[in-house]
Amino acid sequence: LSHTLAFLSADVQSVQRKLWTEDDSYFYNAEVMSDQSRDSLGEFEQIVLLALLRLGDNAYGVPIRQEIEDRTGRPVSVGALYSTLDRLEGKGLVSSFFSDPRPERGGRSRRYFRAEASGVAALERARNMLASMWEGLDLTKA
Amino acid sequence: MQRTPPRLALFLLRLWLSGPSYEAVAGDLYEEYQDPSRSSSWFWQQTFSTIKPLWAPPVWSAVSPMRMVRSTGLLTLRQDLSYSIRTLRKSPGFAVIVISAIALGIGINTGIFSVLNALAFRPVPVQNPDRVVSIYQVFHGSVNRHVAGTESLFSYPELKQYQHENQVLTGLTAFTPVQAALSAETGRLIQGDMVACNYFPVLERQPVLGRGFTESDCRAERVSPVVVLGDSLWRSQYNADPNILGRIVNLNRVAFTVIGIAPPKFEGAGAMTSEFWAPLTMQQDLRNVGPGISFLPDANLSWLYLIGRLKPGVSIDQVRANLALTASRIDKLYPGRTTQLTVDVATLFGEPQERHELLSAGYLILAGVSLVLLIACANVANLLLARAAFRHREIAVRLSVGASRGRLIRQLLTESLLLSFTGGIIGSALAWYGSQAAFRWMMNSFPAGTIPKISVNLRPDPQMLLYTVSLCVLTGLVFGLVPALESTRIDLNSGLRDEFLLAGRRSRRWLRSTLVGAQVAVCLVVLIAAGLLARGLNAAQNIDPGFNTHSVLSANFDLRREGYDEARVSAFKARLLERTRSFAGDGNVSLSAMPPLAGMAWGEDILPEGASKTVLPLLDAVSPTYFNLLGLPLIAGRSFTEQEVDTSAKVAVISQSGARKLWPGQNPIGKRFRFSDDKVYTEVVGVAHDAYMTNLNGIRDLFLYLPAKSTDPRFSVLIRNPDIEGTSRLLRAAVSAIDPKMYFELTTIDEYRRIQELPSRALSFLSLVLGAFSLLLACSGIYGVVNYSANHRVKEIGIRMTLGAHPREVLRMMMQQSLRPVLIGTLIGVIGAAAATRVLASVLYGVSPFDVWTFACVILLIVGASFIATFSPARRATRIDPATALRHE
């Protein structure tokens, strides 16, 4: 019996691992992706970083979204904005700090963001990368 | 003034986001929401866009509690869920039975709660309602207060003083409900509020068209006959006419100018639906209690509901403390009196007395429906235990390959919670539709004009959600925990073989019997309550009110509402009586101050001659034909004469037990008494049989009938005629011939009687449904247990029969073992019912809460039903062929 059990348990374990990886693959890919993108910036990440630079000292959630919406004409949800900002902060490209509580926010603080030097450098790289891809290219002929 | 975003949305954000993320996101949304163009649906959209990525990992990388859950628990939760769904799919019959039992149990529960919530807990529908408080006062000590409404209301000078002295409210306003005849257009009675002139600003609900009231509307009495119409009245009566401002509307035949239209769906801050608003200073015209009588100067008159809005940063406790100062200052003017203020977030039923009555009735019903939910839980627990027997092998295998017991219990609980939540969702959906339909049915079953219109908001809100979710969790745990604990306690050695089935675990059998016993006990309580209520209703329908209620039409007039003076009142009455007598016959028409059994009462202190203490009788003012018309026998003496009525003679007819109370052992005819504010004595000329004049709850022993005065502006005309329809038509024609704009209510005494019976009718209907449902559940539970043991004791029974047991003996054994928990449950249930049914006494109309007949019938019913549920599976057990049984493995 113990023999059978040992076999059974191995089987169950392998099944469980399979289940696990199936469930986890989503995660895993995402992690890998963000690893790959450590050095290069996505389009929206660039937009957000540029908005931070434009706003300077007044860069917190509300004006950032306003700025992006005004300039790109694209609505930006709070969720999307903060997930990007958090990701950028995780990469060390931006930093954030909280203000004092404010009455117009129901007694909540503002979270101000600032682009770090590495963020500016990443923007620079992204622009150069794109510019070199554009170089000598004429869309009208393509 | 700041706009507060949907609280539920903020709550969800807080749940999903970590502290700092929440601070930033909620703060941003709050700040942007201050822009009036942002709707609450925008806010919800943003909320979902924020939390959506967290449902489906992994985009969001902020540190949030959900992330931690995700890394540890969420995966197993997902596994458990998908596993549960798969197992339940394999036994759809089981899932359907469990889910429908739970859906019904939770559905009835949430349905009742949603009505209670709408009436007693939901804040009034104004802007930022959680900052709006209602204020009531309760007096202690020696109180001599004038009351128009209930005692806990305020007077106009008190309102002024509170407005002037408080430092904690941005505004304090007042309203008082009033009914007015919309006379010129239709003979329609509409409900509205007379309000202080800062009413709309304090509630932050400005009229959408035109303006609200200004201080100049309230500067003096009767200076500003202006009215703001409700949206629904404007649409239904005036076809949403955009040019209505400045138009004249006649309320109680006084011309009012329309100055505004209230926002859609705004129906006032009180329980009664308001269709119009007018300044308090128009009280003499709208609530005319007599020529020249004004409520405004009387500092000791309760008639105003007070509501106020908190200043930012001020807590309700600070308001209580601040307003109490004013209350104690007012108390100084009334030695011996202390006032206690009740300040709470304003709800539809805030008045302390009403609220107390509503809540005690509501909690009682909730307790009843929770009992039924409990039965459903016990039933489901039983089913789960039975299922556990079939799954023991699966569980044994999982335990032996290394699954921890905790992990398995979690898996089983996930399954229970999945069942309870599915049931809960279906049940809540049913409850939502059901409670709306039920409330409408309740309101429609009252004839128009007999009770004020109440509209409630039954839409789900955070409280409702919280209630339902906790109910689901609780239900899932209650029915899932014991089976989960029990079925994972397996001896692996025997568990992996099939011996388990054979042994029929003693502890589990005991557990299942206990569950059956508990079900029977609870079911008995519910059924006895249902039986008592049904008997009570029956008794109410058979109560002899002491007079003949059939074929009596009652037309109720309030001529003060029509702006009549005394001379016009008596002229109108004389002409109306003349006309009605001409088509109904002299003896079939009578006057009274109020219709019998309408739940209305009027009382004044009297002092019998020679006595030193006053007593309070109930009174009615009637014409000579009254007793004859109602078939109310006079035991001694006589009725009034026409002449006594015409001259308002000081004579009275007294009720039988009233006479016995005032003058025991003496002949009451010729005895005298006087009203405490009257010098002249009134003489008793007749004694009437006792009767239920006000309602069916009991006879007021001391009842006095006085001659009807021709100048009383409020009166009812009673007409006896079997042809109700025809008489109504003739009466309407007669009234409109005299005054075509007159508004009056036309009902029958039988109709009033039906209204009296309505609460007990609704309660007994509800409890009968619940009783039937719980009996069904209990019986299916018993059947399940017996069936289970019959199936799983095949081998044992086979051995018994091989050894010579007679089928009859086997049957007896099976029946005995199965019925024992039923009998024990019955015993406990009887004791429980005896303790519980006392609270029903007030709606039982004379049936004793310990009514032997009901108890006996219900016990017989339960035992009989259990017997039937036991018999067929038990008999099946006796038909076992011993040879097959022994091979059974």
Image (cartoon, rainbow, N blue to C red):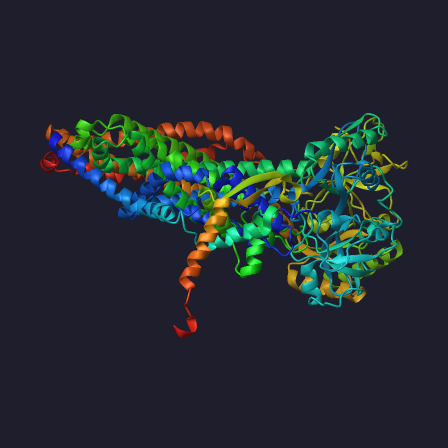
Residue at the spot 41% in from the left edge and 37% down from the top edge: B68
Give the mark count. 0
Q: In the picture shown, does residue B571 fall above or below B852? A: below
Residue farthest toward the bottom in the current orientation of the protein: A141
Taking the image as drawn, is residue A87 in sight? yes
Image coordinates of residue B202 in percent, x first then y, are: 74, 47
For the C terminus of chain B, the image quarter is: top left
Q: Quadrant of residue B344?
A: top right
Image coordinates of residue A114 in percent, x first then y, are: 55, 45
- Given residues B831 and B380, the one toward you in this image is B380
Q: Quadrant of residue B114?
A: top right
Image coordinates of residue B545 in percent, x first then y, are: 64, 43
Image coordinates of residue B301 in percent, x first then y, are: 81, 39
- Given residues B457 and B272, the one toward you in this image is B457
Residue at the spot 50% in from the left edge and 55% down from the top edge: A47
In this rendering, would B49 be left or right of B323?
left
Taking the image as drawn, is residue B349 in sight? no
